[in-house]
Every structure is written in C-alpha cells, then in structure tokens.
C-alpha cells in the first residue's frame, strides 16, 4: 500500500497500521459517529472528516432556541469523543468533491485517497424554491439557527418593552412557527412557555396575554405522522398552553411582519401578523448526494437522497456507502424508505461499519434489519406524546419516556448530567439559564447558504434539474411540506433518537 494510503497522507501513529485499509467517514453526526465508534480498535485506519469540529444532538436544538439549555449542552467536540482512539484521525474540513473512479475525495483543496468511504453528511433545510424566505424565517438545523431564533425572539421582546404603540408591541410579541411536525410542535410549545411564564415575569411593560405563538401547517392536524389520538392530544395540549393552531393553509408569502396563507379548502387568503417567523417545514439531503451522483451515476430521489443498495453501497461501487439522512433506503418489508431520523441513522452507520469490517476479514455479515423503537414528540414542560410500537403514551409519562430516551442517546456523560440538572432546575424554578442575546443578525445564513450554492453548481455539473420546486415534497423525516405537496414517503414524527 503506497504512502498516499496513510492517514490522508499523514503518517499513521503506529507502523503496524500502515497496511491497514483506510476507511474515510464524512460527517460526524448520528450515523458517522456510530460508524466511527464501531471501528475503534479494529484493524482499519479511520479518518473522520466533518466541516464542524463537533457532534450536534439536533433533537434538543429547540431547547437552545428557547434558552432552556446552552449550545455546549447539545454539542460535543469530535476530537474529544473519538479522536483519542489510536486508529482514528479526526480532520476538520468540508468535503466538496468525490472521485469514485480514483477512490478520492477533495477537501481543503486537496485530494485524498480511501479504500472504503462512508458518506454520512446528513441534511439541511429547504424552502421549496422560496430561498428569499430564508433570511426572514430562520430554519432549525444547526446551532447558528437555534441561536438566531433565540436572538430574534428576545430582541423583539426587548423592543416591545420600549415601544409605546400597543399595536407594534403586540406584533413584536407574536411568533409564527411554520411546520407542524415534531420540531415545529416542540419549538412552539417551548416558545409559548418562555414568553408567557419566564419572560412576561421579567418584563415590566409586557402583558403575558399579548404574547402570541402561531403554529402553521397545511394539514388538518399537527404531528401528522403520529397516530391521530396522539396528534389530538398534542394539539389540545398546545392550544391549552396558548399556541394558536393555524391548519389547512398554504404559505404564499413571508415578510418581516406577516405570513400570508391561502386556505386549501376555500382558497381564501389569511394574513397573520408576526414579528418573528421560524421555519421548520422543509428538509433536504446534503449536496454531497448530488456530488456523488455526478461522479458515479447513482440515483438520487426528489429530496436529494442517494438511493442505496441493501448494503448501503451504490451501484458499481461496493466500497462507497451512504448512510443516515443522506440515503434513501427502501429495502424494507413494506418497501417504504426509512425516515430521516436519528434512530435509523445510528443503526445504518453501525451496520455499514460492521459490514466493511466483515468484508475486510472475509466474513459473512447478517443483512441490515431496522429496529423501530417508536416515535415521540415533546410539546411542553412535562408533556410529551410517544408511540412505542403501539404503546401510546401522553402527558407526564410520555415526557419521562422522552427524557430518558434522549438522555440515554446523548453521546457524552457530561452533557447528560448538565441537561438533567438544567431540566430539573427549570421544572423547579421556571427559570431558563441561557436567555442570552448573542451573535450577529442573520448569523444563520452562513453555512447552509454556501451549501445551497454548491448544490446549484452540482446540479449544473450533473445536468440535473434545479432544486426541488415548491410542489415537491421533502425527504422522509421532513416536517410536512407547507405547500401540502405530495409526499413520496410519509413525514416522520420525532423518534426516540
Ligand atoms: C431540530 C431537529 C429535531 C430533530 N428531532 C429528532 C427527534 O426527536 N428524533 C429523531 O429521531 N430525529 C430527530 N431529528 C432528525 C435527526 O437529527 C437526523 O435524522 C439525524 O441527525 C441524521 O443523522 P446523520 O448522521 O445522517 O446526519 P447529521 O446528524 O445531520 O450529521 C451530518 C454531519 O455531517 C457534517 N457534514 C455535512 N456536510 C459535510 C461535508 N460536505 N463535509 C464534511 N462534513 C459534512 C455535518 O457538519 C454534520 O456533523 C431532528 C432533526 C432536527 C433538525
């Protein structure tokens, strides 16, 4: 094996490793991290590449957005998590190109070789062809998004405190959350609690009754992927907490002071004044899916997800695996593709790594079987709904299940303890410890916009059509499309991660 096969041209730490196969993993999220863990201590050299230096626990982003916990509580440095393993090299950089014929990837403007490649670059947000909405209505996929949402909500309240005009004050205290999937419900439930209880108590000029949180969805119920009884329980709880459910309308326009809808049933226009708007309605796969398609000729679905073989490889390239949100895996008993959620991502990442090891060692490996542990969504303090393979829970018991599942899946013990402590503190005092206004205006525009631009370039290179238009549906795991377009697979509820 040539020198170039060492840790991306770096010397391996031990001479014995020089001849070990080189596994490159792109993305240190749920799938990539599990794959890395699976390969620790095995006779392979692993290089984990991520454009961020941390693993992010996305299911708790809404808690960062609403000041319940801080950003370090939901993110852990990758070097600290796996970088100390002797056969794992962690590198920071954004992979921009893949040359499957040469078995090389390009990042930080250099080409590097692999023997096996695991692509686990996850997904980003989409506005279904309405990119002009992104600066007005931040999505919630990365820490910068959560920080921006919190900054906007708190700044609006600060301005309201100093505004003599009652109409303007009411506008500033109104938030619209677009998308009634688990992320939208979680965000709306936590925002109304923040605004009604914690903030109203601290602002002398604001009345709690003027705070308004609207949850907008084109469907006839929130959490459409869950059992109707659980949807109803969640909807009723949200309404009782003060969230206004605005159902059955398509978003036509978003400005910095209102959301304009048309009723799907009557076509009537509805204008909803809102000082802050958040977008949880659309998810699409990382641009790397299309980059891979351009290099290998593999297929991607409408949401940009790579259509994979039963072993997560792509046709003609058994050494390339695609896992997590980036892949469309439909080799299931019902032929439906697995949803873009943490549970499937973790299982896919672990299985793909084990399969690579088995292949290297010339052993047989049992086919991939997904184990569905159920789905859940938290809609307020001490209230969640959970469907654990037919056992339906709501209320406090649902919340306890949700809390235990999330703590168990949290990769770092330190974060588990800090989260538990902060949750208990919040339950006891109703105080949130991370209500800080930090960052710059539109800080959420950075990472994903670059990605969006590259996706456009990848489209051109592949001769593919432009990104999914408004009428197209998000990939599995996306919150329902605001335009109510056809779903190739049912939208997923948040699951036990
Ligand atoms: C707000 C929110 C709430 C959610 N709640 C739940 C829930 O309750 N339950 C549940 O099951 N699921 C939930 N999900 C979905 C779940 O988080 C995802 O399905 C899961 O993160 C997918 O894992 P992944 O490893 O495929 O991608 P990710 O976890 O997104 O990781 C992808 C990684 O790849 C890196 N990366 C991307 N592009 C590149 C590149 N070009 N080069 C290098 N690195 C790159 C990224 O920085 C990232 O670290 C939620 C998602 C969000 C956004």
Image (cartoon, rainbow, N blue to C red):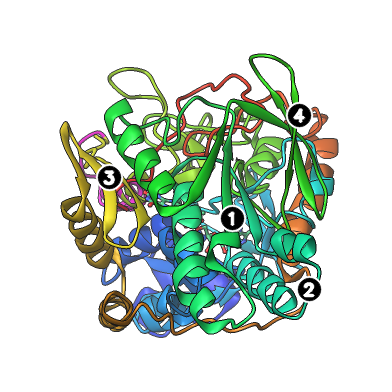
Binning the other alpha carbons within 10 Å of mark 2 as few (below 14), some (14 to 19) or many (20 upward) gives few
Instruction: Write down the quadrant of residue 143 in the picture.
Output: bottom right
Label 4, ligand 1: CB separation under 8 Å: no
> Which region is colored magenta?
347-367
Q: Earlier in the sequence, mark 2 or mark 4?
A: 2
Residue 5 visible = no
Q: Nearer the viewer, residue 255 or 304?
A: 255
400 relative to 310 in the view: left or right: left
Q: Nearer the viewer, residue 341 or 306?
A: 341
Tell which tag, 1 or 2, sits nearer the viewer: 1
Q: Earlier in the sequence, mark 4 or mark 1?
A: 1
Residue 63 shows which numbered tag?
A: none
Residue 224 is covered by the magenta coloring: no
Q: Which residue position is annotated with label 3? A: 385
Marks 3 and 2, how far apart at CA:
35 Å
- The prevailing secondary structure element of the residues shown in magenta is helix
**Residue at position x 82%, y 43% in the image:** 456
Marks 3 and 4, how far apart at CA:
33 Å
Tell which tag, 1 or 3, sits nearer the viewer: 1
Tell which tag, 4 or 1, sits nearer the viewer: 1
């Amino acid at each position: 094996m040539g020198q170039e096969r060492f840790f991306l041209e770096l010397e391996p730490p031990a001479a014995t490793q020089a001849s070990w196969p080189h596994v490159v993993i792109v993305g240190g999220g749920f799938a990539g991290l599990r794959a890395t863990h699976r390969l620790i201590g095995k006779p392979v050299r692993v290089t984990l590449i991520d454009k961020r230096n941390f693993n992010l626990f996305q299911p708790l982003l809404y808690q960062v957005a609403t000041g319940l916990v801080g950003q370090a509580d939901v993110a852990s440095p990758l070097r600290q998590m796996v970088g100390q393993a002797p056969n794992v090299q962690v590198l920071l950089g954004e992979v921009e190109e893949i040359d499957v014929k040469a078995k090389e990837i390009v990042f930080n403007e250099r080409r590097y070789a692999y023997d096996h490649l695991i692509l686990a670059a996850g997904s980003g947000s989409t506005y279904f062809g309405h990119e002009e909405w992104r600066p007005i209505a931040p999505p919630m996929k990365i820490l910068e998004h959560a920080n921006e949402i919190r900054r906007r909500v708190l700044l609006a309240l600060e301005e309201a405190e100093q505004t003599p005009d009652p109409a303007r004050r009411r506008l500033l205290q109104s938030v619209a959350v677009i998308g009634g999937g688990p992320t939208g419900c979680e965000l709306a439930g936590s925002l109304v609690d923040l605004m009604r209880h914690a903030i109203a108590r601290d602002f002398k000029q604001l009345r709690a009754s003027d705070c308004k949180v609207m949850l907008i969805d084109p469907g006839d119920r929130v959490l459409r992927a869950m059992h109707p009884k659980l949807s109803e329980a969640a909807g009723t709880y949200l309404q009782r907490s003060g969230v206004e459910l605005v159902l059955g309308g398509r978003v036509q326009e978003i400005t910095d002071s209102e959301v304009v809808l048309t009723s799907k049933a009557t076509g009537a226009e509805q204008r909803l004044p809102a000082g802050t708007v958040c977008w949880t309605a659309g998810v699409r796969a990382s641009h790397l899916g299309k980059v891979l398609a351009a290099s290998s000729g593999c297929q991607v679905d409408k949401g940009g997800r790579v259509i994979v073989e039963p072993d997560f490889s792509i046709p003609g390239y058994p050494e390339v695996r695609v896992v997590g949100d980036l892949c469309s895996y439909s080799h299931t008993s019902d032929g439906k593709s697995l949803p873009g959620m943490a549970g499937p991502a973790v299982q896919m990442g672990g299985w793909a790594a084990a399969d690579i090891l088995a292949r290297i060692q010339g052993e047989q490996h049992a086919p991939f079987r997904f184990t569905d542990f159920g789905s859940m969504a938290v809609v307020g303090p001490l209230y969640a709904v959970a469907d654990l393979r037919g056992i339906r829970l709501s209320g406090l018991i649902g919340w306890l299940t949700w809390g235990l599942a999330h703590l168990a899946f949290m990769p770092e013990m330190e974060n588990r303890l800090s989260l538990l402590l902060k949750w208990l503190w919040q339950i006891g005092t109703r105080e949130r410890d991370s209500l800080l206004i930090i960052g710059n205006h539109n800080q959420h525009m950075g990472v994903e916009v670059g990605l969006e631009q590259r996706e456009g370039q990848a489209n051109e290179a592949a001769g593919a059509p432009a990104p999914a238009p408004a009428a197209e549906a998000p990939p599995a795991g996306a919150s329902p499309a605001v335009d109510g377009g056809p779903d190739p697979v049912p939208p997923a509820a948040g699951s036990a991660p």
